[in-house]
Amino acid sequence: MTRNQLLKLGAKGALTLGIAFSFTSCGGGGNGDTTTIDVNGSDTMLQVGLAWAEAYQAAHPEVLINVNGEGTGTGVTAMINGTTDFAQASRPLKEKEVADITKARGTAPVEHVVGYDGIAVFIHPSNSVKSLSIPQLKEIWAEGGSINNWNQVGGSDAEIQRFGRSNSSGTYGFFQSAVCGKGVEYKPGTGAQPGSTAVVHLCESTESGIGYSGMGYKNDKVGWLAVSKTEGGQAFEPSNESVASGDYPIARSLYIYTLGEPTGAVKEYMDWIKGAEGQEILAGEDFVPLN
């Protein structure tokens, strides 16, 4: 099932599908002839995590995969608590997070890059503004920024309403660093949403809205912006091609963290994710594969 198909289910449907992969065993331990692998973390990677689990379990019925995803920070917490084998993350772990995991578990987390993603800037489809530069986006999003009305960038006379993620989200931190600048806070009044679907839905229904999320959450009811690196530079819409080429300026790696180097069933699953079948599924979820 693709990410766009999951979006059509709505939040309730996605939650139900998530529960379908949930089992009581945890920690990658064996239970007779069955092994459980627990996955937690990034909301951005939730759908691809579910798609990986569905395909892998179909081929390996002896492996049960439990997938959850509320934000990168929840994966870090689960790794600290010893309740996950994979922490999916849409940003690199912070030094303090690595230190906290190492202290709690006695072993340092190991980073695995599993794909790439472009962060789209969503707008209402009726918005006449079709492209902006990174400096303009900074003035819209960053604390102290001077752009607060769409007429300042060639649009209608309407106050810009900003929709983002909660601070436990890796997308929140990545967009903040890439657009606002490292250490620069978002403007007060930026609406923090619990997930990417909520951000996109608000941009669908709010004529003066703007929000950010993974490009795979695009649907035919919402618009998005082409983005240029500099004022007057060539603007690119997010796509597999523009992310892979480096032309789209708001792009990132996607990560899975394990406690030390993976072994056994966890290593086999990781190898499968990085292999041809896992990467084909990743591409089907509108991410950019490793090769």
Image (cartoon, grey):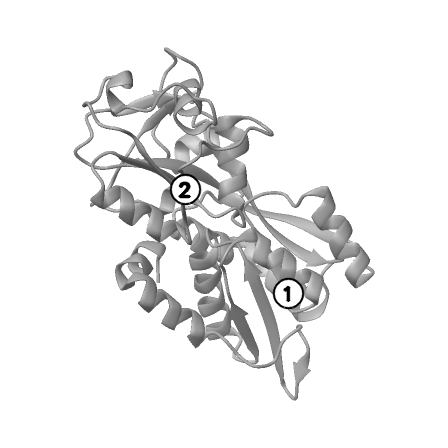
Q: Is residue 106 above or below residue 123?
A: below
Residue for point 37% across, 25% down: 227
Give x and y (percent) for residue 3: 36, 55
| Total residue callouts | 2
Q: Which numbered circle lies on residue 164?
A: 2
In the rendered structure, which amino acid carries the disc numbered 1?
A: Glu
Residue for point 45% across, 67% down: 55
Residue denoted by label 1: 268
- Give the structural element (helix, strand or loop) at label 1: helix
Q: Is residue 254 above or below residue 148?
A: below
Residue for point 49% across, 43% down: 171
Q: Earlier in the sequence, mark 1 or mark 2?
A: 2
- The N terminus - image quarter: bottom left
Residue 229 falls in image quadrant: top left
Give x and y (percent) for residue 25: 61, 80
Q: Tell me whether the residue at label 1 lies in contact with that at label 2, contact meaning CB atoms closer than 8 angstroms.
A: no
Q: Nearer the viewer, mark 1 or mark 2?
A: 2
Is any atom of residue 271 visible in this view? no
- Give the structural element (helix, strand or loop) at label 2: strand
Give x and y (percent) for residue 70: 49, 58
Front one among 212 and 240? 212
In the rendered structure, which amino acid carries the disc numbered 2?
A: Gly
Q: CA distance from mark 1 to mark 2?
A: 36 Å
Front one among 183 and 75? 183
Is any atom of residue 8 visible in this view? yes
Q: Is residue 249 above or below residue 162?
A: above
Give x and y (percent) for residue 72: 56, 52
